[in-house]
Amino acid sequence: MIPSGIMKPLRGKLPLPIIITTLCVLFFIAVLYAERLSFLSSKSIFKFKTCPRKNTKPKSSDKRVDKEIANASWIDDRFDFDPEECNVANGKWVYNKSIEPLYSDTSCPYVDRQFSCVNNGRTDSDYRHWEWQPEDCTLPNFNPELALQKLQGKRLLFVGDSLQRNQWESFVCLVEWIIPQKQKSMKRGRVHSVFKVKEYNATIEFYWAPYLVESNTDINIIGDQKKRIIKVDAIAERAKNWTGVDILVFNTYVWWMSGLRIKSLWGSFANGEAGYEEFDTPIAYKLALKTWANWVDSTINPNKTRVFFTTMSPTHTRSQDWGNMENVKCFNETKPVRKKNHWGTGSDKRIMSVVAKVVKKMKVPVTVINITQISEYRIDGHSSVYTETGGKLLTEEERTDPQNADCIHWCLPGVPDTWNQIFLAML
C-alpha cells in the first residue's frame, strides 16, 4: 500500500505546447546541420527549387529539365530585361568566341573609314566577341527583324556629335543586311543623313549637332578650340529639323571637354561675339541642356514621340587610368579593364549629374540610355591607330606612334552595337 501522503506519479501525455516546441527546436537544429553540410559540399542534401525567372513558367512536365535544375551548382537567377527594374550599368563583359557580329565593316557599306578598323588594317579580333552581361537581368540580343517592326511607318533620328554618328551607323548596319537591296537607300548630307527602308516605310536618320544648341563651329568647324563660342540659349534653328520625328535619340558630351572654360553667348552672333562670358564646363553644359529640355517640353507631344538621351561615351586618352604608366593612350589594348566599377578621367561625373538633374525635372518623359560605365571598361574597342586623320588613313609609320591613336571613337562592329542592343531593349 502506498502511503496516503505520497502522490502517484502522473501517467499521461506531455502537454501539446511542450511537444510542439521540442519538435520545432529539433527541426531547426536539423536544418542548420543540413545547411552546413551543403555549404561544405557541392551537393546539397536538400533539393530546393529555384525561383522562376520573371515572366517565365517552369514546365513541370519536363522531368529531365527539373532534374538538371535541381542538380545545378549555380543557377542564373537574372530576370528578363525590364528597363525600370534593371540597372544595366551594373555588370561585366564576358568573352564569347562563338558569338559573331551581325555585320562587318567589309560587309556593311555605310561604315565611315574613321570607324572601319578591319579595313584599315586591324588584325586582332577579340574586341568583337565581348558581350555585356548585366548582373540583375538578361539583356536580349539585338534582333534586326524586331527592330524594323518597331520602326514600321516611323522616323528614328539620332541627334548629336560624331559619337552619335558612331551609334547611328551601328544601328543601320545591324538592320540593313536583312533588307533587300532594292528596298533600302542612303542619302548622306553634311548635316542630315537619311537611311530609308522602303518596305517598312521607315527611316533611320542622323543630324549633326555636336552641342545640341547652336555655336559658331557647328557647320564650319573651327579647329582652334579657344575661338569656339557656344550660344547656350539658342536651339530653335537646329531643332526645327527634329519636329515630326517619332523616336529621337540625343547626345552631347565630347565637344564640351576641351579642358578650357567654355565661351558662352546669349543672343545673336550677328550682334558680335564680344559679349560672351566664360564658364566652367558643367555650368555651360547645364545652361545648354536646360535650353534643350525647354524645347523638348514645349514642342514634343509624348503621345506621338519618344525621347531618349545617350549618356557620355568615355574617352581613354590617359593609360595611367588603368595602370599602364607608359602614357600610350589606348594604343595596342586588346582586352577590357577587369576592375569592377573602373572609372577613368575620360568621363566627367559632373556632366552625368547635370543630365540626371535636368531630365528629372522635365515634363516630357526622357529615357536615359546609360552607356558610360559599360564603355569605361572597353579600352580595347577604340579605332586607335586604325583610322584616318585629316581625311587620310594613318601610314604604317604613323601607326607605330601611340599618340596618333584615336581613343574617342569606336571600331564598328564593336561597342556601339551594345549601346543599340540596350536601346532596342528599352524601345
Image: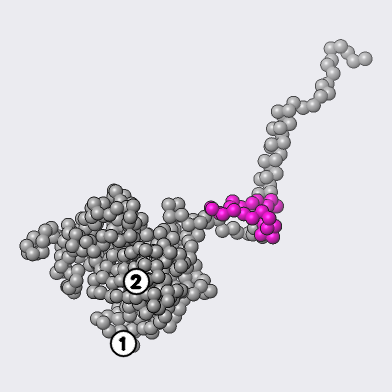
Residue for badge 2: 196
Looking at the image, is 247 positioned above or below residue 378? above
Residue 183 horizontal/vertical position (percent): 39, 75
> Which of the marked residues, 1 or 2, is nearer the chain's N terminus?
2
Secondary element type, mark 1: loop
User: Which kind of residue does numbered mark 1 sit on?
Assistant: Thr
Q: Quadrant of residue 265?
A: bottom left
Instruction: Tell me the residue at 48%/62% (across/down).
Output: 140
Q: Which mark is residue 264?
A: none
User: Which kind of residue does numbered mark 2 sit on?
Assistant: Lys
Range covered by the magenta-colored residues: 44-66
Nearest the viewer among 319 and 210 is 210
Residue 246 horizontal/vertical position (percent): 33, 60
Residue that protrudes farthest toward the top in the picture? 4
Q: Specify whether residue 62 is painted magenta.
A: yes
Whole-number angstrom distance, CA of label 1 to CA of label 2: 35 Å
Residue for badge 1: 395
Looking at the image, is 358 positioned above or below residue 196? above
Residue that protrudes farthest toward the bottom in the picture? 396
Q: Specify whether residue 214 is painted magenta.
A: no
Looking at the image, is 115 positioned above or below residue 202? below
Nearest the viewer among 353 and 208 is 208
Mark yes or no: residue 379 visible: no
